[in-house]
Image: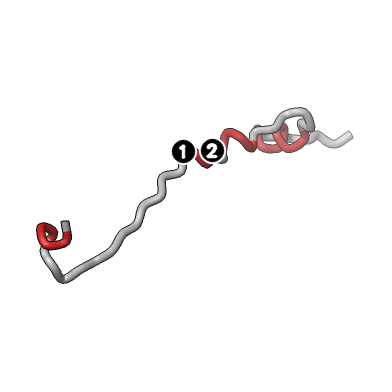
Amino acid sequence: MALVTLNAFDLILTSQGLNLGTLFEKPMCLIKQETIFTSKRPANEII
């Protein structure tokens, strides 16, 4: 009989009832969107 060594990741992958996907995915409401642009004009002219 061979010994089988499992680490935490093996245990998670073999556990069918355990869904950890939500721990690693950000909800859409928490994702920040921003627009970045550059200009040769000073900020006070743009504003």
Which SS class for mark 1?
helix
Which residue has dot 2 on it? 27
Q: Residue furthest bottom?
A: 40
Q: Residues within 10 Å of mark 2 (few under 14, many from 20)?
A: few
Which SS class for mark 2?
loop
| Amino acid beneath label 2 | Pro
Left-right relation of 33 to 15: left
Q: Residue furthest top?
A: 17
Residue depicted at 72% across the width and 29% down the height:
18
Q: Residues within 10 Å of mark 1 (few under 14, many from 20)?
A: few
- CA distance separating discs 2 and 1: 6 Å
Please state the horizontal and vertical placement of residue 11, each as a whole percent of the image: 72, 32
Residue 15 against residue 32 in the figure, above or below: above
Please state the horizontal and vertical placement of residue 20, each as a whole percent of the image: 65, 33
From the image, which quarter does the C terminus lie in? bottom left
Left-right relation of 20 to 34: right
Residue depicted at 89% across the width and 34% down the height:
1
Please state the horizontal and vertical placement of residue 46, each as a whole percent of the image: 16, 61
Q: Residue furthest right?
A: 1
Q: Is 2 in front, or is 44?
A: 44
| Amino acid beneath label 1 | Leu
Which residue has dot 1 on it? 30
The number of discs equals: 2
Residue 35 against residue 4 in the figure, above or below: below
